Image (tube, coloured by chain):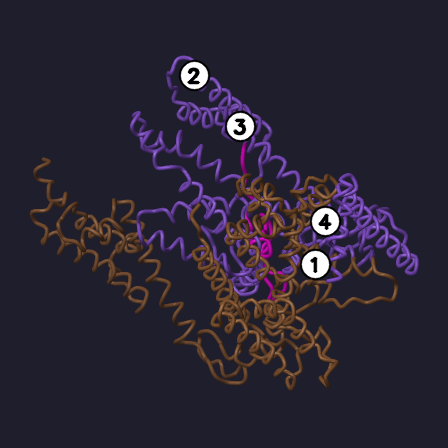
Chain colours: A purple, B brown
Amino acid sequence: MKITNLTSGIESFLDDRPKLKKYLPQALTIFFIIFVLGYFTFNAQVNMGNRGIVFGFGFLQQEASFDIQFSLIDYDGSYSYGRAYLVGLLNTILVAVIGIFFATIIGIVIGISRLSPNYLISKFAEIYVEIFRNIPLLLQIFFWYFAALRALPLPKEAISFFDISYLTVKGWFIPKFIWTNFSILFYSIIISIAAIIFTFIFAKKKQEETGKRIPVFLISLVLIITLPLLGVSLGNVTLDFEYPTLIQQTTTIFNFTGGVGIIPELIALALALSIYTATFIAECVRAGIMGVGKGQKEAAASIGLTAGQTLRLVVMPQALRIIIPPTTNQYLNLTKNSSLAAAIAYPDLVLVFAGTAMMQTGRAIEIVSITMLTYLSLSILISMFMNWYNKKIAIKEK
Amino acid sequence: MIEKLIFLKPNKEKLNLYMFLGALFFALGIYDITSNSFFDKNVTSFLPTALSFFTPLFFGFLGFHLIRIEYSGNKILDSLNKNINLNWFNGILTLLVIFILIKMIPGLLNWIFFEANFSGTSKEECTGSGACWVFINVWFERLMYGLYPNEQIWRINIAFIALIFTVGAAFFVSPKNKKYIIIFLLFVFPFILISLLSGGNFGLEKIPTNEWGGLALTFIISIFAILFCFPIGMFLALGRRSSAPVIRYSSIGFIEFWRGVPLITVLFMASVMFPMFLPDGTFLDKLIRVIIAITLFEAAYMAEVIRGGLQALPRGQYDAGKSLGMSYWKLHILVILPQALKLIIPGIANTFLALVKDTPLILVVGLLELVGMIDMAKTNPDWLGFAAEGYVFAGLVFWIICYAMSRYSQNLERKYKTDR
């Protein structure tokens, strides 16, 4: 009884003072946040003082003196911690991009398969989704890395694809492309892409003005083939391959040199990430296509659009509006999940920086906050871009 | 010319002939691939390799083409054509699925059952070429209970049997008593569970948390994180929709921060960075730190799910509540939340599922639940080389848990579905 008296007393007291009622909770929140932050900072200062650590980011310039197994840029032990951070970040981005690429392809195929009129295909797709969605990602990564890829043969008995590419327990060795005058080819591709974009804009304008359709697809196909070919033949561009070759390191150990070696950690991680995320993307795709009303397709058919035109001009633009926001979320999840790389020692940001570098320097606060901030800014960047894109394609209601 | 080729276009008149021919060719294709995968014999080996590889597909395709007769009048044939043999492309896809299944199933069955070893106590007893389930058998207690002392395992058993019984009881008692059981489960049981497992009182031996592990730890972490993340998420969601700017922006900041970082960095923060923030000399158990980290992390996701439900409610509900003179809390507890939560059962279930699937990550900070224990078992010098069995077993366990949860949530969704 007493407590209810008290609360109702406070309530009536606050009801008499609307301004206080409005500002008191906010003031309390601010006070609480400042108190917690201040308490943590104070303790951290005391603790670091006891251990003789000075807070600061100067250690980023120090020599890292540890090696990284796989790096996209020049790196060895003599580079700084800052450079090691960059190597880790690039590796994270690499695996995220590969994962997103394959997850999208598998996801779209499975999502469309689930809507197939063919009973077996739709059941197959459903089983795929139910199996891989309900198993923890870490377990899948471990399975591919420790069980599946470890069963591959040694370099000596490598599985060979047409004698130019080899799959072994030590990784996948593919030929390296060696271009001369690559920049000419590059620029000609850029020019052809620009020309295609221009054609698209022109065709759209023309159609809106006169109603005539220009065969954009054919024109762009011609453009993307002829312009680079022209560049290659005129600009003296040549392509050489450096094939991986088997060499004997000692009497029993063989390995491949030359070419590009893709380490098994990267393969396992990319496989698991794309297979796992594809199940979620498949569900997004399915929901999107199912979300377009049947009437839309019938209306399109009744004004005489062909099946292809219906799909391209009526169904897809509406389905994409439903598909894209949740799919972006999945891309973000994939990028964040790529940090599980640390568990199988793929040198990503977490392993290199929050693992090795932190062990060596002992700067827990600085390193963990840099790592978190990096992921946070990646997430915010992607979601800002997607919000912008969403706004652009949203239905403009009057 | 076309008259002569008419036999390529199946028609209704000679239905039986076409059905017979189609079935024959289809059977030929199946026979070819079956003998190939079950008995390792290639019946078409007289053809060049490239051709002989595609013969089953060719036979099957021909068979499917011959039985593709529209409105044949035969019910089975019609439904077959409609479901798996709509056009040539669909037919090929069907064939591919069937052939892949035939190719894969013998190998899988052999590995799992026929060539596998089930009983025994050491690696040497795995003589077959299939899986070595002896590995799981021998390590079973460790996989379930972690490093918990053998003579104390009864405590875990009792705790979880009690849990199963109380949950079971909740399904059968009358709705009036159900309330008390749920309150007991939510507010009393977790503390009984913890004091029973950790010991140190009532004459029970104290068992430090670093000896906890296995599937039991997965359950403990999931139960506590689910219990706490839900109310925190609810407050965050309400905070995000609050009209007071300070509360709104601090909720947004909190939610977006946790949603923007991967769980693994949160766990690193909990294990190495958080102790620096506590006063010198105080010690918070690592398991508790990890549970707090997972809870806050999932609470942010939960908040977004609940916000979705709040936004989906029509404004009229708020206005109606306010016009009855309800205060903020009364309005939300009696009117808004019951309706909103009903709408977002799938979202809540997905968040809980994500939470359960995220628990294996704690192995990066040295806590060994099921996946972590398998990691430990497979690096044991006596048991090298059984990673596949271990991961398949763990995958099966997690799959059963997650699939059951998602099925249950679909059930709930149907149960609470009300038409608007």
Crowdedness near tag 4: few (<14), some (14–19) or many (≥20) residues, C-alpha within 10 Å: many
Q: Considering depth in this image, is B110 or B214 the residue closer to the camera?
A: B214
Residue denoted by label 2: A208
Q: Which residues are magenta?
A: A238-267
Front: mark 2 or 3 = 2
Label pair 3/4, CB-CB below 8 angstroms: no
Q: CA distance from mark 2 to mark 4?
A: 48 Å
Secondary structure of residue under mark 2: helix
The front one of A184 and A84 is A84
How far apart marks 2 and 1 lie (CA) works out to: 56 Å
- Answer with mark 3 or mark 4, whichever residue precedes in sequence: 3
For the residues labelled 2 and 3, the Cα–Cα distance comes to 29 Å
Q: Which residue is mark 3?
A: A189
Left or right of residue A274, residue A25 in this image: right
Tell me the residue that label 1 is attached to.
B293
- Same chain under badges 2 and 1? The reply is no
Residue in view at x 55 percent, y 74 percent: B166
Front-most of residues B118 and A242: B118
Amino acid beneath label 1: Ala
Task: Evaluate whether label 2 is on the same chain as label 3.
Answer: yes
Residue B22 horizontal side relative to residue A121, left or right: left
- Residue at mark 3: chain: A
Looking at numbered disc 4 in the image, what kind of residue is underneath it?
A: Met
Question: Closer to the N terminus: mark 2 or mark 3?
Answer: 3
| Residue A92: % across, % down | 65, 48
The residues bearing labels 3 and 1 have C-alpha atoms spaced at a distance of 49 Å
Q: Residues within 10 Å of mark 1 (few under 14, many from 20)?
A: many
The numbered mark 4 sits on a residue in which chain?
Answer: A
**Rendered view: B119 above or below A171:** below
Crowding around mark 3 (Cα neighbors within 10 Å: few <14, some 14 to 19, many 20+) is: many
